[in-house]
Image (cartoon, rainbow, N blue to C red):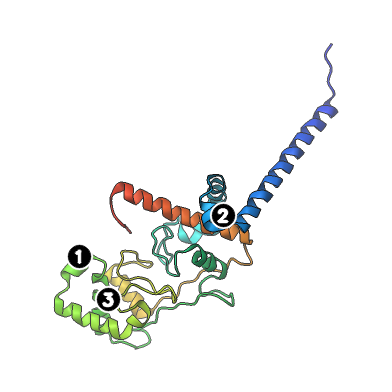
Amino acid sequence: GRSYTPGLLATNQKLRVEADVEKAVMDRSEWTRRIVEEGYATIAADPALMRIVRETGHRLFLDNCAACHGQTAGGGPGFPALTDKAWLWGGTAAAIAETIRVGVNSAHEDSRVSEMLAFGRDRMLPRDDILKVVDYVRSLSLPDARNALLPVAREAGKTVFLENCAACHGEDAKGNIETGAPNLTDDHWIYGGDRETVFETVWSGRKGHMPTWERRLPEVDRKILTLYLLDLEKEAALQTDTKGDGHGG
């Protein structure tokens, strides 16, 4: 009759598993080395590496970033979207990688630092001036707000803006990536663009926070996240172009 040796079969299976694990470790060692050593543009142009970036980056993002920025990186109240090109600190690979490394208003010695002043709470501006500048700022990006604002009111708000806000946001209100001051002329709002919320922002100020990931994630993981975010941004832009909707919020 037929016979078999369970011990031999178990040993063979164990050897196969060990061989598979060893190959997987060697494969990972190779692609992690390449990601660490090669430039962003080189990696982005390599379909095989980008497949790994998308798979690994998705997992890393869900585990470490989605709680604040959302599972699809679309952001939420108090947390910016990461797919719309409205980067507070710059959207180059180097700038994104540095933000991930040091954080914003974090405990890192090189942390990016930014804070919106509390113009009302700290009595820097009277309520009437805050209302003027709120209406002016909203008119820069919201057609309904712009159409509802009389020219004289617009000029009054602009005067308040130039005297109190332009130092950070620029005279053209397009922001400053050196200080993390957002562009106020697009349709991307971190805390909300309704009149009440913008008033609260100017009155009470804002101070966002992002932790430093330098000690939490190794260099290769931070680089994968950077590549993953750039890829998400690219895909979002392609979808927008396909729909023909322009730059939406």
Residue appearing at x 32%, y 71% in the figure: 184
Does residue 71 appear anywhere in the picture? Answer: no
Vertical comparison of 239 with 163: above or below: above
- The picture quadrant where one finds residue 164 is bottom left
- Residue to which mark 3 is pinned: 134
- Residue to which mark 1 is pinned: 144
Q: Residues within 10 Å of mark 1 (few under 14, many from 20)?
A: few
Per the image, label 2 sits on a secondary structure element best described as: helix
**Which residue is at the front of the view, 35 or 188?**
35
Vertical comparison of 7 with 241: above or below: above
The answer to whether the residue labelled 3 contacts the one labelled 2, judged by CB atoms less than 8 Å apart, is no
Picture coordinates of residue 123, whole percent (x, y): 34, 88
Per the image, label 3 sits on a secondary structure element best described as: helix
Residue appearing at x 35%, y 70% in the figure: 183
Q: Amino acid at mark 1?
A: Asp
Q: Amino acid at mark 3?
A: Val
**CA gap, disc 2 to disc 1?**
40 Å
Q: Identify the residue at the far top of this view.
A: 1
**Which residue is at the front of the view, 234 or 189?**
234
**CA gap, disc 3 to disc 1?**
14 Å
Where, quadrant-wise, is the C terminus in this rendering? bottom left
Picture coordinates of residue 227, whole percent (x, y): 52, 56
* Left or right of 25 on screen, residue 80: left
> Which disc number belongs to residue 60?
2
